[in-house]
Amino acid sequence: MLRVVIETKAPKECAKIHRQSLMTLQRIQADPEGKIRAFVIIGSSGNYKRTIIENHECRLAKALLSSGAIVLHAQIKDGEVLWILTCTWDGFRRLLSNLDSLRLKYEIISKTTFYKESTLTNKA
């Protein structure tokens, strides 16, 4: 298993949601029809709002999830998205292929391997 940190531009579909404020995505999943659902926190720690986004048409999130990656955390700020994912090596190759097919500029910030004794936890 890998832990991957990727930075991308925020898709146009997300621009109308976050409107230049900080948006932190806590839980992201796709339903059987491919619609994205996410639990998000919009704003800073002193002034924030928790909400659920349903039926979102984010092609970038679809590409990430369809690769088999699990989105642990994502943060959108100033038109950039920082994604923290976990996936297998095969999932990582599919992830890169999916990002390339979107013709989206991205940067892999880090890619680390989990060791056998490591455990995955997602603390709320």
Image (cartoon, rainbow, N blue to C red):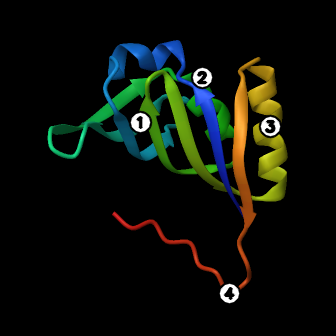
Among the two numbered marks 3 and 2 on one chain, the one whose residue lies closer to the N terminus: 2
SS label for mark 4: loop
Among the two numbered marks 2 and 1 on one chain, the one whose residue lies closer to the N terminus: 1
Q: Mark 4 points at which residue?
A: 117
Does residue 103 sit above or below 32 in this rendering? above
Work out whether residue 107 or residue 124 is closer to the camera in this orientation and state it. 107
Among the two numbered marks 3 and 1 on one chain, the one whose residue lies closer to the N terminus: 1
Quadrant in which residue 95 is drawn? top right
Does residue 74 sit above or below 115 in this rendering? above
Amino acid marked by disc 2: Arg
Q: Name the residue under label 2.
A: 59
Q: How far apart are marks 4 and 1 (CA)?
A: 32 Å
Q: Distance between the residues labelled 3 and 2?
A: 14 Å
Does residue 113 sit above or below 73 in this rendering? below
SS label for mark 3: helix
Left-right relation of 53 to 63: left
- Mark 2 vs mark 4: in front: 4
Q: How far apart are marks 4 and 3 (CA)?
A: 27 Å
Q: Mark 1 points at which residue?
A: 37
The residue that appears at 32% across and 39% down in the rendered structure is 40
Amino acid marked by disc 1: Arg
- Mark 4 vs mark 1: in front: 4
Among the two numbered marks 4 and 1 on one chain, the one whose residue lies closer to the N terminus: 1
Where does residue 68 sit, x and y in percent of width and height? 69, 48
Name the image quarter holding the C terminus.
Answer: bottom left
The answer to whether residue 1 shows anywhere in this view is no
The residue that appears at 56% across and 72% down in the rendered structure is 120
The answer to whether residue 105 shows anywhere in this view is yes
Q: Residues within 10 Å of mark 3 (few under 14, many from 20)?
A: some
